[in-house]
Amino acid sequence: MSKVGFISLGCPKNLVDTEVMMGILARHGHELAPRAGDADVLVVNTCSFIAPAQQESIDTILEMAEYKKFGRARRLIVAGCLVERFRRQILEDIPEVDAVIGTGEVERILEAVNGELRELPPEPPAFLYHDLTPRLLTTPRHQAYIKINEGCDHPCTFCIIPELRGKFRSRRFESVIREAENLAQWGVREITLIGQDTTAYGEDLGMRDGLPQLLARLAAVESMAWVRFLYCYPNRVTRSLLDTIAAHPRLVKYIDMPLQHASRRVLARMKRGSSGDTFLKLLERIRATIPGVCLRTSFIAGFPGETETDFRELCDFVVAAEFDWMGVFAYSDDETAESYALGGKVAPEVIAERSDRLMAIQKKISARKLKARVGRRYTALLEGPSNESDMVWQARLEGMAPEIDGKVYITEIDPSLGLDEPEIAALAGRMVTVQITEAQSYDLVGRVVNVIDAPLEIPLLAGTAMQSTASPLRILR
């Protein structure tokens, strides 16, 4: 049996694919290597969404190829989205690569590692894992992702996801519920539902209000503290969805809704439709239905044909909308995207300047909103030592999604709680009350003043597809 090292690039959806591949290998006796230098086989699960992601994937493949030329590794496998784009070129241009696996071939990882992968005629990606699929979690034990659908049917001109991930397809309802129940029994306190468009969940299965139904069932899973979902499509944010979020305490009051732009003209060129005024009305409805909701969005700066007038309209919209969290992507051309053929390309230096201007506006909004939290107390998920320093712990409020939003840095655990060092160490993954003492541009600082829940006793789950790994795998983002 081989020692296999994984490098997972890109989004949480890609990370779930990596976890599935790891689970398949572990079930068949292969060992996971925590460092590239310890691996007999190296697997790079690539991203190809935008040009910088493609370049990062290529650079990582070349870096891992050095371990095959000068180190212990004897096989190098490339998986994921880049394979769907450049399958033949990867094999021809990087001779160190022994096998490639597309997004629809995740289950063939065992053949690839064993050197038994036969090349088949490429087909549109159709793979979709389920609750019985082996999976090895790489996230902290208290937090996990569940992919509820795959692929996309939207015609957005800037996006190549349909090419990379195939047509939209949903997992079976009960399969998602069983996976969530297994995760809860395993000790996961927070699940995050992901998919290219989670709000379309179940439409291909003939379900109406599929996501609200799914959320309502997940809200009843015992020992689960928080359930959130990412990647809303704005025209699918229904009254039923909002009412469901508002009605269940376990459903976090948080909506991630990438809007991409606010100019009606630019949105039309993106084949997204709608307008800034329509979005503002939607945001008003969301806030009225879900008091205290946190809102996140993302925009593309410099889309072909975006004029200074269009961009100013976007800036004015951001000021009016007052999002809690926001991301900005600098537009980059992709020759297979429909937007590649559009005229009116914006110069790279202008795109960069517009991206900076937009984020400067949001930075002020974020800082003001966070400052208003100083002195208040909130329920938080205490995650453990921060990535910045072992001397400082970090936590998240329900309005902070893992990895993409800000954090609460914990500087003190109230001495009146009477906790010794082992008891403090055991707080990781627990729900606590924090008092906010300081606000930064995107993060908060606070102290733990109460521990809300008891420690979970984690049973041994015979026959479960869920496993966890303590291996510090190299997960690049």
Image (spheres, grey):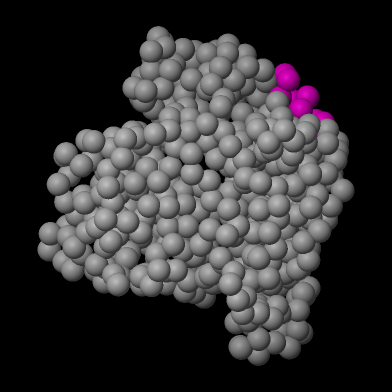
The picture quadrant where one finds residue 392 is: bottom right
Would residue 77 be found to the left or right of residue 228 on screen?
A: left
* Position of residue 440 measured from the top left corner of the image (x, y, whole percent): 60, 53
The picture quadrant where one finds residue 81 is: top left
Would residue 90 be found to the left or right of residue 450 on screen?
A: left
Residue 210 included in the magenta stretch of the image: no
Can you name the residue that lies furthest to the left here?
70
The reply to whether residue 257 is in sight is no
- Which quadrant would the N terminus be assigned to in this image? bottom left
Residue range highlighted in magenta: 277-286
Note whether 316 is above or below 201 in the view shown. Answer: above
Would residue 282 be found to the left or right of residue 302 on screen?
A: right
The picture quadrant where one finds residue 222 is: bottom right
The residue sitting at 78% across, 42% down in the picture is: 212
* Position of residue 281 measured from the top left corner of the image (x, y, whole percent): 78, 24
* Position of residue 106 measured from the top left corner of the image (x, y, whole percent): 42, 50
The residue sitting at 72% across, 33% down in the picture is: 206
The reply to whether residue 305 is in sight is yes
* Position of residue 136 measured from the top left corner of the image (x, y, whole percent): 49, 65
